[in-house]
Amino acid sequence: MKDVRTHVGEVLALFREHGELSRTDVIDLSGLSRSTVNQRLAALHSAGLIEEIGGGESTGGRPSSRFALNRSRAVILTADIGATGFVAAVCDLAGTPLRHTSVSVNVWDGPHPVLTAVDAAFDELLAGGGATGADEVWGIGIGVPGPVEFAAGRVVNPPIMTGWDRFDIAGWFAARRAPVVVENDANSRAVAEARLRRHDNLISLKVGTGIGSGLVFNSAIIRGGEGAAGDIGHTRAAVADGAEGLPCRCGNVGCVEAYASGWAIIRDLDALGAHAGDVAAVVGLVRQGDLDAVRLVRQAGRVLGDAVADLVSILNPETIVLSGQLAECGEVLLSGVRERVYQRSQPLATRNLVIGVSELGEVAGVTGLALITADRILGTDQIDELLERIDTV
């Protein structure tokens, strides 16, 4: 049986990428022989990872069978943790959120209270599924607003996550007996956008209470040597040059976050006598046409545009997509980003560049986390472990 399993993940990957396939489709796409494909399909079907969905086109004889990923075979739990709250979800094996909830927390309170709340949200979501409430959990994906050492599954030197440095997040969920993936929140959003838009070259900007960015190029997350690639939120803002930089929550001065984040706009509105308790209130003021809020959000867009312009010239993305609460300001924010990107980036790099707002809303992060976790548990290198686990159930 081992020889059948050795590359069964490659066949499963075809269903994850292409959807419904016949035996002939799998043969053509994989280059494997018919007998080998039949073995692989039998192993996947026996494990419940693919399901037969009916006949395909007939060429005069019996219609060929077609198969698809059995996305409801198990579930993936995901939590997209931000500075002031998180979204938790139960997702299927294709990454689609089945149920989700939003919970307010303060990431500065440290890992114990935040992850306790995440655990409770998972239990509530699983119990609320009715007939599917007892679905088997095959993986857990946790997104955090800080740099992540991906292989080790831990946050390293986070600028704003007091008490989280090198905390064993995966170990926290050990009782659930499922693989745990820890990922930067902006990276997870970038994966969701890139997969659903089918764009290989994409920059994702998360703009909420803080600022994060994720890069997906040639279908892979660009992490850098230590997992800190693309973090523009704590680079120096162009507006800080030649002036005394504003203090940032990370302890430095002049960071992009200190000028363009939700908390910075709240600070500036307060100074003008317009109280906004959170980013949602800022969005509300913008939608009401408040002149100060509109001006500050548009200026925040310019600061973001300055920060990302060099990345556009160097990396030449197809798309820049904004998500997070502040992105709900829409064109008010986007106009500032576009203005500076088109002014400062190379003309060839911006010729076909699309800059827009995510259509995924608050489930962008949990969707990306589910996709990344599915890559981990269903990937070619891990499929043996999963199939052996299924055999022992």
Image (spheres, rainbow, N blue to C red):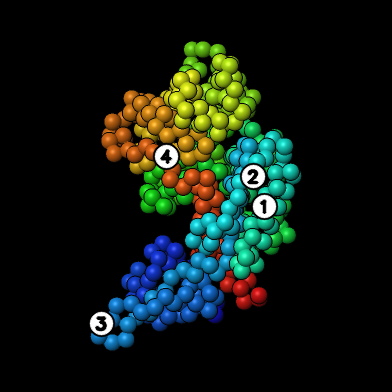
Residue 103 has which mark? 2
Residue 299, image quadrant: top left
Q: Is any part of residue 110 visible from this angle?
A: yes
Residue holding disc 1: 121
Report x, y in % for residue 40.
46, 76
Q: Earlier in the sequence, mark 4 or mark 3?
A: 3
| Residue 130 position in % (x across, y down) | 62, 65
The label on residue 59 is 3
**Disc 3 packing (10 Å; few <14; some 14–19; many ≥20):** few
Q: Above or below — where is 28 with respect to 350?
A: below
* Left or right, residue 195 beside residue 379: left
Q: Are marks 4 and 1 in contact (CB under 8 Å)?
A: no
Q: Which residue is rendered at x = 28% and y = 31% of the image?
A: 347
Give how far apart the Cα atoms at labels 4 and 3 are. 46 Å
**Residues tagged 2 and 1 counted as in contact (Cβ below 8 A):** yes
Nearest the eye: 249 or 168: 249
Are circles 2 and 3 on residues that touch, CB within 8 Å? no
Numbered circle sitting on residue 357: 4
SS class, disc 2: strand
* N-terminal label among 4 and 1: 1
Q: Residue at x 41, y 62 (%)?
A: 17
Work out whether mark 2 precedes mark 3 in sequence or the reverse, and give the earlier one: 3
The residue carrying pointer 2 sits among few (fewer than 14), some (14 to 19) or many (20 or more) residues within 10 Å by Cα, namely: some
Q: Is residue 250 above or below residue 48?
A: above
* Amino acid type, mark 2: Val
Question: Which sits earlier in the primary sequence, circle 2 or circle 1?
Answer: 2
Determine whether, in the image, residue 205 is placed left or right of residue 127.
left
